[in-house]
Image: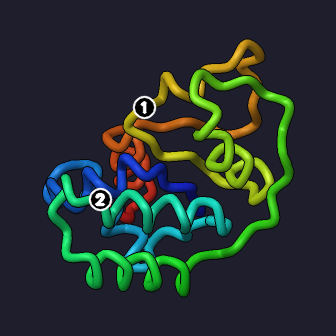
Amino acid sequence: MRIVLDTNVLVSGLLSPHGPPGRALDSVVSGAVGLLVDDRILREYAEVLTRPRFGFDREVALQLVELLAEGADHVDASDIAVELPDPDDAPFLEVAIAGGADALVTGNARHFKTRDRRVGVRILEPSAFVAALGARGHA
């Protein structure tokens, strides 16, 4: 299984490691699930994880981003003609589509609602993703 992990799941997984976001992150870090990224996603991961309000050690946060980058499949994604409620979410959807992701895992599924609901990738909340992993015998 290959996924795109929205930044909100990454942050939530670090803040609450025993909940569904933490289990989703664990599945990526352990290699049980493949991660798809591009440079835009990695930059956002680094920028968000180093925000003082989260309280993460800057060097540890950047090491995590580096670890994720090393284990991920890097995708060349093109702009897509889909209007999202938050245009900053477009890279996640673009990478998911271009990389043939099995799912885009996000805590904000409503951010990926489009006028044309056929975006070509499953959008899963962390709990649904963890359930899908369990059904595949990865949980």
Quadrant in the picture for the N terminus: bottom right
Q: Secondary structure at mark 2?
A: loop
Q: Nearer the viewer, residue 133 or 55?
A: 55
The image quarter in which residue 79 lies: top right
Q: Is residue 59 above or below residue 73?
A: below
In the image as oriented, which residue stretches furthest toward the top? 115
Relative to 103, is 110 above or below?
above
Residue shown at 60% from the left, 40% from the top: 88
Residue 35: horizontal and vertical position, in percent? 55, 67
Side (left or right) of 16 relative to 44: left
Q: What residue sits right under mark 2 in the picture?
A: 51
- Give the amino acid at mark 2: Arg
Residue 4 point in image, percent of width and height: 56, 55
Q: Nearer the viewer, mark 2 or mark 1?
A: 2
Q: Residues within 10 Å of mark 1 (few under 14, many from 20)?
A: some
Asked if 76 appears above or below 32 in the picture, the reply is above
- Quadrant of residue 89 in the image? top right
Q: Which residue is more in the foreground, 134 or 13?
A: 13
Report the side of 116 relative to 88 (left or right): right
The C terminus: image quadrant: bottom left
Q: Amino acid at mark 1?
A: Asn
Q: Can you tell which quarter of the image residue 126 is in?
A: top left
Instruction: Return the residue nearer the eye: 107 or 56.
Output: 56
- Assign a secondary structure to mark 1: loop
Q: Locate residue 122, reporting x and y percent.
A: 61, 37
Question: In this rendering, would 136 be left or right of 34?
Answer: left
Answer few, some or many: residues within 10 Å of disc 2's Cα (few below 14, many 20 plus, some between 14 and 19). few
Q: Which residue is mark 1?
A: 108
**Measured from the top left, where is residue 98 in percent x and y?**
80, 54
Of residues 130 and 41, which is closer to you in this image? 41
Question: What residue is drawn where x is 57% and y is 29%?
Answer: 86
